[in-house]
Image: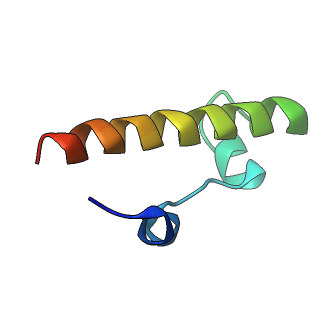
Amino acid sequence: MLNKQECDKELKILSIEELKEFEGLSDLTDQQAIEIIETLKEISLIAHKIVSHYE
């Protein structure tokens, strides 16, 4: 299992511009994009913990 420092190195966080490049997301406000990015980050970390637990 990765420790926090290793996880931070492995974690790819989308920028607002990268998120808005996806089809249907170009009209998001920056605040909406930030909220989505934070949510995706949280889901990713939870999924990583679950997968790591069963390895």
* Residue 20 x/y as whole percent: 71, 42
Residue at the location (55% across, 36% down)? 42
Left/right of residue 46 with respect to residue 54 in the rendered view: right
In this orientation, which residue lies closer to the viewer: 30 or 24?
30
Q: Is residue 28 visible?
A: no
In this orientation, which residue lies closer to the viewer: 19 or 23?
19
* Residue 12 x/y as whole percent: 52, 60
Q: How is the image coloured?
A: rainbow
Q: How many marks?
A: 0
* Residue 33 x/y as whole percent: 77, 36
* Residue 46 x/y as whole percent: 41, 35
In this orientation, which residue lies closer to the viewer: 29 or 24?
29
Quarter-of-image position of residue 27: top right
Residue at the location (33% across, 42% down)? 49
Above or below residue 24? Residue 22 is below
Q: Quadrant of the N terminus?
A: bottom left
Above or below residue 50? Residue 13 is below
Above or below residue 54? Residue 7 is below
Quarter-of-image position of residue 6: bottom left
Above or below residue 42? Residue 3 is below
Residue at the location (88% across, 34% down)? 31
Residue at the location (78% across, 39% down)? 34
Q: Is residue 54 visible?
A: yes
Left/right of residue 13 with respect to residue 53 in the rendered view: right
